[in-house]
Image (tube, rainbow, N blue to C red):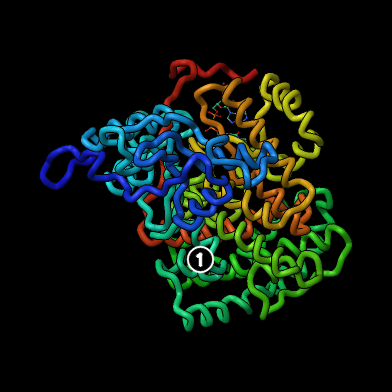
């Protein structure tokens, strides 16, 4: 825990937020939920006069939605009564310990029975400048969990807090308020664009959406020679071809300006490539990009050959923004490792695509939707999920290496799914709740919640994206994150070359003669 400037340990009073957003037990949950949304807080403390008697959190709202309760239910029916509290004079580290140990995200601060503030995980992280616990590891754990391998100013994920950001901005807020082009600009340039800069950037990107002729000519052959291959595998081959056809040289040998130009070209053309490959696979004509359509609308237009409904274009755009970057995930790390060798940009992007294609990383959304289809109705959820976990299967769309609380992307996508509606949304919310309960029962202490992939499939399905295009759609935004990292790595490069602990038979053994 960081000390205050005078050297004394910080107290809860130093870091708590006030005034607290409150509710009363007899008011409607819908009113309390509106207040949470307006004030941008994750909980309300339920009070009788000055005295806290309960707490209502976002998680309670999910339970409520899953139980098909109505917004006119009362706060008192859904709150957690008698929440744990801390005193203002307590050391901030004790609040941190309680938050971390019990998995709370908010603790009321109470002075002689009177509510005086609230401490949230975010307060602690931001004000007390606590390093996330996962960054403190000294030994190298399996899967490099928590190991810091580089410095970046592109963004970060705070797993205990359930928060991630691009540059200095909350990524969810960006997804709710900005266009994909704005966020792409932010990642490349470190600041959000002015109106003039946005227009110039959009104009710069538009012609780059057109597939270069050398690549376009080869697409039918790629599609035909591996007709059953997933579109992402075909993309991997195509990006490789593009790097070679356009003469991408090793990043070590080219200027930052040339590398940036290549990065822009690849990001701009990936949606066009994916849609072209998808359409060729199904025997349709390739649809050319539409320079005047924004990114997501153009993507859906090239996929389905019709201009999408604005709601669908916006929902897909929000999904795309929310998945552009996410710390040192496996594919981003892969892209940086490849760049650290000085290899060309296409090689790094191809590596990223390969890593993303795995079901433990980006390959989960179609499986998560498949799980819902298999479950079919809520009464089958409990036995289905229990069997799966007891068999040792992983529930797709649940669990995360970094998040030990709600994945903010899944929270956002749940609300996008609710906005869109559709047959799967209610079932998904109920299955989510049941799965979280059963994971807590059968995998206690693992802190498994819904990740981005669970609602990604629901949102994309509702927008008419076929399930074989779920992971490719993820790739079409993550390529922006990969390339931002490639540019950062190349700008201040040192070969990434770790070591392994050898555990085989002791060497040197005599080499037996060949038979
Ligand atoms: C994402 C993921 C790979 C992170 O894994 P991780 O940090 O390496 O966690 P581990 O594999 O060490 O798992 C820890 C424990 O939780 C369990 N667990 C993790 N995710 C689980 C899931 N989705 N369903 C059931 N159990 C799960 C593991 O079985 C393990 O249990 P154990 O201690 O009894 O062996 C993992 O949660 C997962 O496989 N999720 C499903 C795939 C998915 O949704 N991927 C998209 C990620 S955005």
Left or right: residue 205 versus residue 167 is right
Residue at image coords 56%, 66%: 248
Residue 146: x and y, percent? 41, 36
Classed neighbour count for the residue bearing mark 1: other residues with Cα under 10 Å, few (<14), some (14–19), many (≥20): many
Residue 489: x and y, percent? 41, 56
The quarter of the rendered structure image containing the N terminus is top left
Q: If the picture is divided into quarters, which one holds ligand 1?
A: top right
- Where is 23 relative to 267, above or below? above
Q: Nearer the viewer, residue 466 or 70?
A: 70
Residue for badge 1: 183
Q: Nearer the viewer, residue 238 or 428?
A: 428
Residue 396: x and y, percent? 66, 36
- Asked if residue 188 shows in the view, the reply is yes
- The image quadrant that residue 399 belongs to is top right
Left or right: residue 236 versus residue 187 is right
Residue at image coords 61%, 31%: 436
Count of numbered labels shown in the rendering:
1
Residue located farthest toward the left when viewing the structure as drawn: 6
């Amino acid at each position: 825990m960081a000390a205050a400037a005078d050297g004394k340990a910080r107290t809860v009073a130093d870091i708590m937020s006030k005034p607290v957003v409150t509710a009363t037990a007899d008011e409607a949950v819908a009113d309390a939920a509106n207040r949470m949304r307006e004030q941008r807080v994750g909980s309300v403390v339920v009070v009788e006069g000055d005295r806290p008697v309960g707490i209502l959190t976002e998680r309670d709202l999910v339970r409520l939605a899953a139980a098909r309760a109505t917004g006119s239910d009362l706060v008192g029916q859904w709150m957690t009564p008698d929440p744990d509290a801390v005193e203002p004079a307590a050391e901030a580290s004790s609040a941190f310990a309680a938050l971390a140990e019990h998995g709370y995200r908010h603790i009321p601060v109470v002075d002689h029975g009177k509510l005086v503030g609230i401490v949230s995980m975010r307060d602690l992280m931001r004000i007390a400048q606590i390093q996330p616990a996962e960054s403190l590891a000294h030994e190298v754990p399996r899967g490099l969990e928590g190991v810091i391998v580089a410095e970046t100013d592109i963004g970060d994920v705070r797993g205990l807090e359930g928060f991630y950001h691009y540059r200095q901005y909350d990524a969810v807020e960006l997804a709710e308020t900005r266009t994909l082009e704005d966020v792409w600009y932010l990642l490349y340039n470190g600041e959000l664009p002015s109106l003039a800069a946005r227009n110039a950037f959009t104009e710069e990107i538009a012609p780059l959406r057109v597939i270069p002729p050398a690549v376009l000519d080869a697409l039918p052959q790629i599609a035909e020679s591996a007709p059953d291959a997933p579109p992402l595998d075909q993309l991997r081959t195509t990006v490789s071809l593009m790097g070679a056809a356009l003469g991408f040289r090793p990043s070590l040998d080219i200027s930052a300006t040339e590398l940036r130009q290549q990065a822009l070209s690849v990001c701009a053309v990936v949606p066009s490539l994916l849609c072209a490959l998808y359409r060729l696979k199904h025997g349709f004509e390739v649809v050319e990009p539409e320079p005047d359509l924004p990114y997501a609308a153009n993507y859906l237009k090239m996929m389905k050959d019709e201009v999408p409904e604005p709601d669908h274009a916006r929902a897909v755009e929000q999904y795309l923004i929310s998945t552009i970057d996410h710390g040192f995930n496996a594919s981003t790390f892969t892209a940086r490792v490849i760049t650290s060798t000085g290899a060309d940009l296409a090689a790094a992007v191809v590596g990223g695509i390969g890593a993303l294609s795995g079901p433990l990383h980006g390959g989960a959304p179609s499986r998560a939707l498949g799980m819902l289809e298999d479950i079919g109705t809520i009464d089958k959820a409990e036995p289905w999920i229990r069997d799966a976990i007891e068999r040792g299967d992983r529930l797709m769309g649940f669990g995360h290496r970094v998040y030990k609380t709600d994945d903010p992307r899944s929270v956002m996508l749940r609300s996008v799914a609710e906005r869109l509606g559709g047959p799967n949304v209610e079932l998904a919310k109920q299955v989510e709740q049941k799965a979280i309960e059963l994971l807590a029962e059968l995998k206690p202490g693992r802190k498994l919640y819904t990740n981005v992939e669970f609602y990604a499939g629901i949102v994309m399905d509702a927008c008419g994206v076929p399930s074989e295009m779920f992971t490719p759609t993820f790739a079409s935004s993550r390529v922006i994150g990969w390339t931002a990292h490639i540019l950062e790595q190349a700008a201040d490069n040192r070969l990434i070359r770790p070591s392994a602990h050898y555990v085989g038979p002791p060497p040197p053994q005599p080499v037996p003669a060949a038979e």
